[in-house]
Image: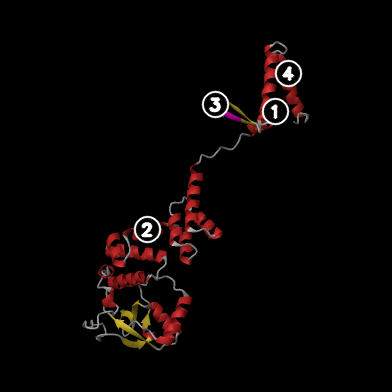
Amino acid sequence: MAEKKLSLGRGLSSLLGEERDDAPAPATGGGEPGPRQVPIAFLRPGTYQPRKTMDPAQIDDLAASIADKGILQPILVRPDPKSPGHFEIIAGERRWQAAQKARLHEVPILVRQLSDQEALEIALVENLQRQDLSPLEEAEGYQRLMDEFAHTQEALGQAVGKSRSHVANTLRLLNLPAPVKALVGKGDLSAGHARALLTAKDPAALAQQVVKKGLNVRQTEQLVRKAADTARRPSRPAPDPNIAALEEDLAVMLGLRAELRQAGAGGRLILHYKDLDQLDDLLARLSISGRSLMDGDLDTDDVEAMAAEALADLDDGDGAA
């Protein structure tokens, strides 16, 4: 497993000076076999540093440790092509920053002659193996390794000691909109939250709800599913004001909530009753009206006149139930 994790480039163990005691020391760009001390001002941050931010509290803790015990592992550097006699940091920028806080004048370095490609590869893999990266920084690191060095997800996973599925799922975070990436970068959302939001129609809006309510990953997944179900439901068109007025009139006349559903030239009348007593009352009223018309007590003109009179009463405000 160790060989797989260090398979990229020239191998981190040799580049970081972690050889066996009986192994010959590798040659360095400065012509010296191992670490040497240089003024701290002779170093500058690496061009290919994958970390965008560094936790000030962690730097302070490391500075306190360095002030007490010194730098235990040399900083890996390469000669600075822009400034002879100076060096560019490949791995160990956090140690360099902490050393400045600890007021060290010199730091131990390992000098290696590295191409730009090797510098990028080593900086990425070193940070990935140390778990010093945020989820998005990790994703960006994987993407750069794949784009610039043509690594497959399988080979990349073996190199950094991760499964192929982990690499694939981490790369998916790059598809998130910028507002969600910002929340992940600040630590307001975890990688699990971010992955759950990937399938949402509006991940930025849901992300704000997740942060505001303090939802965990499982609750975030439920929120995304609920939003998807709501989006799939057909929206009911706005009611016609004339239909709404008729529904209200019917409700006043019958004492029941009424709904009119149009379908072409016809439609449906739906009456809602609260209990069986209301239903019995409605049926009784309909039955009496129906029998009166059938028995000849009322003719069609009478029914129309009664309906017109009822509507007139409603207009005058006398038809309240």
Question: Nearer the N terminus, badge 1 or badge 2?
Answer: 2
C-beta proximity under 8 Å, tags 4 and 2: no
Q: Amino acid under label 1?
A: Leu
Q: Amino acid under label 4?
A: Ala
Q: Nearer the viewer, mark 3 or mark 2?
A: 2
The range drawn in magenta is: 260-266
Disc 3 to disc 2, how far (Cα)? 51 Å
Evaluate whether residue 82 shows in this view: no
C-beta proximity under 8 Å, tags 1 and 2: no
Q: Which residue is found at the position 32% from the left and 61% from the top?
A: 163
Q: Residue 181, position in %: x, y?
A: 45, 61
Bin the neighbour count of mark 1 within 10 Å (Cα to Cα): few under 14, some 14-19, many 20 and up. some
Q: Which residue is found at the position 47% from the left and 80% from the top?
A: 60
For label 1, the SS is helix
Question: Nearer the N terminus, badge 4 or badge 3?
Answer: 3
Question: Nearer the N terminus, badge 4 or badge 2?
Answer: 2
Q: Residue 177, position in %: x, y?
A: 45, 57
164 vs 86, nearest the viewer: 164
Q: Nearer the viewer, mark 4 or mark 2?
A: 2
Q: Which residue is mark 1?
A: 254
For label 2, the SS is helix
Disc 3 to disc 1, how far (Cα)? 25 Å
Image position of 74 (left or right of 256): left
Quadrant where the C terminus sits is top right
Q: Nearer the viewer, mark 4 or mark 1?
A: 1
Q: Which residue is mark 2?
A: 169
Q: Residue 72, position in %: x, y?
A: 36, 83
Q: Which residue is mark 4?
A: 305
Residue 264, numbered circle: 3
Residue 32 painted magenta = no
For label 3, the SS is loop
